[in-house]
Image (cartoon, rainbow, N blue to C red):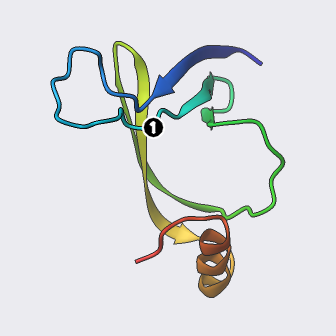
Amino acid sequence: MSFNNVSMWVSNAYSNDLVSNQESPAPSIAAAFTAHYDTSVEIVSMRLRDGEPKYVVEGSGHFAIFADENGVWGVDLEVVKWDGDYGEVINALSRAGVEVW
């Protein structure tokens, strides 16, 4: 199995070059993000942090990975078909903290 590994640190902290009338800077959130592409099975695997799966939803569809010179900054997933009961998928997503509209 061969992996192309990309690791980076991301933060939503404002740049020091930003001029603002705020009294305090925005909160900073740093997270370890890793992405691997396994060419033998055509799978892109992305991890936002360490953890054990509690809720898993599966389906098929399309995706877009948004990146720049600093690495990946966003991923959109377009679901064509969910595996399993749709109501259970929505419940699992909600319990996992996903905002469902």
Give the residue at x 60% y 65%.
Answer: 97
Tell me where residue 17 appears, x and y as whole percent.
Answer: 21, 14
Name the element at disc 1: loop
Which residue is tagged 1? Answer: 27
Q: Is residue 72 left or right of residue 4?
A: left
Number of residue marks: 1
Tell me where residue 82 appears, x and y as whole percent.
Answer: 58, 71
Give the residue at x 77% y 19%.
Answer: 1
Give the residue at x 52% y 70%.
Answer: 81
Tell me where residue 60 appears, x and y as whole percent.
Answer: 55, 59
12 or 58: nearer the eye? 12
Q: Is residue 8 left or right of residue 80?
A: right
63 or 39: nearer the eye? 63
Asked which quadrant contains residue 86, the reply is bottom right
Tell me where residue 73 appears, x and y as whole percent.
Answer: 41, 32
Task: Look at label 1 and name its amino acid.
Answer: Pro
Give the residue at x 62% y 87%.
Answer: 87
Instruction: Give above or below for 56 relative to 2.
Output: below
Q: Is residue 58 left or right of residue 100?
A: right
Circle 1 crowding by C-alpha within 10 Å: few under 14, some 14–19, many from 20: few
* Quarter the C terminus occupies: bottom left
68 or 49: nearer the eye? 49
Instruction: Give above or below for 57 relative to 8.
Output: below
Instruction: Give above or below for 63 relative to 58.
Output: above
Asked which quadrant contains residue 47, the reply is top right
Residue most extreme to the front: 23
Asked which quadrant contains residue 33, the reply is top right
Q: Is residue 38 left or right of residue 101?
A: right
Instruction: Give above or below for 96 relative to 66.
Output: below
70 or 11: nearer the eye? 11
